[in-house]
């Protein structure tokens, strides 16, 4: 994959079934996929090398980002999801790679403001169910 502009990575939230809106102007964002290994090594493992069980273990995704909300409606929706403790459908669009979509729990929502600058936000999401991937 060639180098990509970071600004092209989009974070979107469902505002109705099958309908998504872009959260805002994200200036920094990161998505991490993780899969725990299940160790099944035993006394007769070949050469005493560790053995792992394929297809087992917990898989999860974590996403964090920060920037400026696009408009009042995206700000209000994200804030409401946080205070309601809702699990909501989110999309992460990764340019020239694909789209990750599924339920996420909004675990952190921070607002920050400097005297001579705009109000910014930071958020963190944790996967809360099966995620799908569609290549672009």
Image (cartoon, rainbow, N blue to C red):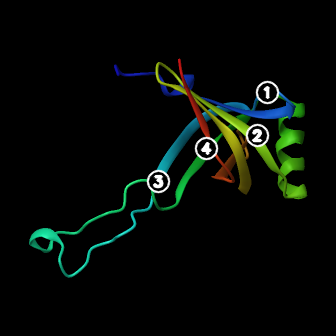
Mark-to-mark CA distance, 3 and 1:
25 Å
Pick the front one: 54 or 72: 54
- How far across and down, in percent of the image, does residue 31 sit? 53, 43
Tell me which corner region of the image, top left, top right, bottom left or bottom right, holds residue 128.
bottom right
Pick the front one: 131 or 61: 131
Regarding residue 3, the answer to whether it shows in the image is: yes
Q: Which residue is mark 2?
A: 89
Mark-to-mark CA distance, 4 and 2:
17 Å
* N-terminal label among 2 and 1: 1
Mark-to-mark CA distance, 2 and 3:
19 Å
Q: Which residue is mark 3?
A: 34
Q: Secondary structure at mark 2?
A: strand
Mark count: 4
* N-terminal label among 1 and 4: 1
* N-terminal label among 3 and 4: 3
Please tell me whether residue 92 is drawn above or below residue 57 in the rendered image.
above
Mark-to-mark CA distance, 2 and 1:
9 Å
* N-terminal label among 2 and 3: 3
Regarding residue 114, the answer to whether it shows in the image is: no
Tell me which corner region of the image, top left, top right, bottom left or bottom right, holds residue 47.
bottom left
Q: Are marks 2 and 1 in contact (CB under 8 Å)?
A: yes
| Nearer mark to the viewer, of 4 and 2 | 2
| Nearer mark to the viewer, of 3 and 4 | 3
Please tell me whether residue 15 is drawn above or below residue 84 in the rendered image.
above
- How far across and down, in percent of the image, does residue 99 sit? 58, 27
Residue at 76% across / 40% down in the picture? 89
Q: Which residue is mark 1?
A: 20
């Amino acid at each position: 994959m060639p180098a990509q502009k970071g600004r092209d990575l989009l974070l979107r939230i469902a505002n109705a079934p099958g309908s998504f809106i872009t959260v805002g102007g994200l200036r920094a964002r990161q998505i991490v996929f993780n899969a725990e290994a299940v160790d099944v090594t035993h006394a007769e493992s070949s050469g005493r090398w560790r053995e792992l069980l394929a297809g087992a273990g917990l898989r999860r995704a974590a996403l964090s980002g920060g920037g400026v909300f696009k408009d009042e409606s995206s700000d209000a929706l994200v804030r409401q999801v946080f205070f309601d403790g809702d699990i909501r459908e989110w999309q992460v669009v990764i340019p020239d790679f694909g789209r990750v979509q599924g339920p996420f729990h909004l675990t952190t929502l921070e607002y920050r403001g400097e005297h001579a600058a705009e109000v910014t936000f930071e958020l963190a999401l944790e996967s809360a169910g099966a995620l799908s991937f569609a290549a672009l």
